[in-house]
Amino acid sequence: MRNALFVAALFLALSATAATPPGGSISSTSGPVSWTYAPVVAGTVIDTGTEDICPPGVCDEYDLTLSLPSPASTFYVNYTATLSIHYTWTSPVPTDLDIFAYGPNGAKYGPGSPDTNTSGDNYEDLVITDPVDGVWALRSVASLSPLPTPAQATATLTIATRTNPPTPKIPPHAATFVNYPADPNMAIPLGSTVNGAHGAGEPSIGVNWKTGAVFIESGNHTLRVLFNDGPSPASATWADKRSPFARVSLDPILWADSTTGRVIESQLDGACSTMSYTEDDAETWQPAEGCGTPAGPDHQTVGGGNYASPAPAVHTYPHAVYYCSQGIATAICARSDDGGLTFGPGVPIYNLTQCGGLHGHVRVAPDGTAYVPNENCSDAAGVERPAVVVSSDNGLTWTVKTISLTKSSRNGGDPSVSAGSANTIYTGFVNYDGHAKVSVSHDRGATWGKPFDAGTGYGIQNTEFAEVIAGDDNRAAFAFLGTTTPGDDQSSAFNGVWHMYVSMTYDGGKSWTTSDVTPADPVQRGCIWNGGGSNACRNLLDFNDITVDKIGRVLIGYADGCTGSCVNDPTANASVGPADAQDSWATVARQVSGKTLFGAFDGTLPK
């Protein structure tokens, strides 16, 4: 009977008329515009991409023609506009509807906020800053709607004078950050001709909780930064503490075991890596084996944490350390039981029939479960989705677990995974549409919550370099590079302006607050090449990194590709230069206010 009722309800929804009225117009003088959406229905959570197709019964569209006092290209020089859409519905059963907006330039916005699945009266608000003029497709989508549910919407357009410089868009009580670029006048380390301040693409970051020392690795340079919290903002002292064992480098990686203070640096060298470690904040280094056998020749990662139960009978270091690398036909991980000095045999974790592309950084949960994220793995139906590759037996066996309600991005890129204190995992990635998404699992990746679009509030259309770190089980941070420019961000003609954004959750992923960490200083102008090899737009290389210090303060290691004259020059572009638009300056974004990821230290930083 239940199936018969659902089929009948679906038939009624499919037979329903379109939005009433089907379209309208709005301007700065028209006042608000209201309409009603036809009922929509979906028996299960609809897969990503439904809003793009907008099939009848599951989705309904209203076309809003937006008129500005003058064309957007000239109007937004001196003015700013906000298009606000208030979207409401009522249902006797738990229902999740979403509002999406598609601009005439191809930009996609939504879903609105808050994203709820409750009975009774519900709403979402979608706010679009500086919308272009033309026809907007505003779509009501059933994410999970057991009964055909109509919705109402009201659009309002407001105009204001643009401030110069623009007021930073920071939500109330959001965490704030200060950016610390590396000192270009650091002493040059022995064996080098330059220090590592510039040429710092694909940095990895770690913190020694015992001393507070922060490390960034890029190329074969290990940079150490010591923060002094006496002044406000804190001062920073940089030093290039390159390991004498770090010579040839095809790929660099650093991992800090925060609680023991051991810091490991790895330099890919063909089918293995050179490796060394320090336990005195890089004053001295000792060589290590570098990898297990076999190993892959690309994109290595190092990480570690608690052993899963039962731990191996013989281990001389408190934590398991993993070395994972990418082969041609498979990816391989090996485990060290002596803190990275030597490694056991390499174990395949997936092959080309399961996952393509490159994996991200290995992370280990408090319960000892090891996770390796990948942007492009196939689910049971053959759909390519982001995934985590999971081992719960200390790296002996691995299982691919795809993230439902997502699809692999057109440009790939490493996703990122991290586990909270009670093993909730958070995974950030670039979705198929270029948007920054983060999803949560409470069962080691077997099932996933509905992904959150962390860039909606800023209208982010393209994303690169997703990075996630968790603290307490209900707290996590998601950092990414984002641009409001739609289109192919791999094209040399792309003119996007990229900023660093950080989204924080303190309620287990139910809500996130996103801030622009670089509001007045772009990280890149132009494309961010994510296809390997040599490209003018590959100055940032393949990824950034994120970590926390002992109080849960978030720190992001990134390469700043737009410095000097590029910062205020809209004609600069990584594809064509000048050199300031093709930089890669090692930088740490350090949290200076708001709640950290460890609740025990709430109040330590200013609100």
Image (tube, rainbow, N blue to C red):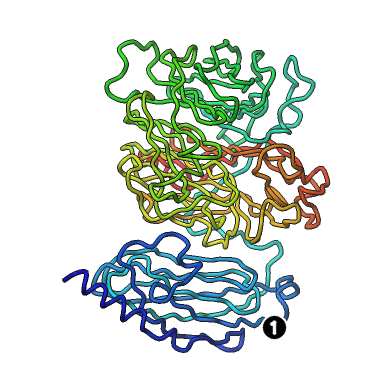
Disc 1 is placed on an element classified as loop
Residue 392 falls left or right of residue 107 = left
Q: Where is residue 307 in the image (x, y as percent from the top left)?
A: 34, 23
Which quarter of the image is occupied by the N terminus? Answer: bottom left
Residue furthest left as drawn: 1
In the image shown, does 594 or 539 lie closer to the viewer?
Answer: 539
Instruction: Judge the density around disc 1: few (<14), some (14-19), many (≥20) Cα neighbours within 10 Å.
Output: few
Name the residue that disc number 1 marks: 69
The residue at 44%/15% (across/down) is: 344
In the image shown, does 421 or 449 lie closer to the viewer?
Answer: 449
Q: Where is residue 208 in the image (x, y as percent from the top left)?
A: 50, 25
- Where residue 184 sits, quadrant-wise, is top right
The residue at 48%/42% (across/down) is: 468
In the image shown, does 26 or 575 lie closer to the viewer?
Answer: 575
Q: Position of residue 105 (x, y in %)?
A: 65, 70
Q: Is residue 338 above or below residue 132?
A: above
Q: In this view, does 254 lie above or below 605?
A: above
Q: Position of residue 300 (x, y in %)?
A: 56, 27
Residue type indicated by callout 1: Pro
In the image shown, does 187 or 140 lie closer to the viewer?
Answer: 140
Residue 471 appears anywhere in the view: yes
Residue 209 appears anywhere in the view: no
- Where residue 83 sits, quadrant-wise, is bottom right
Q: How many marks?
A: 1
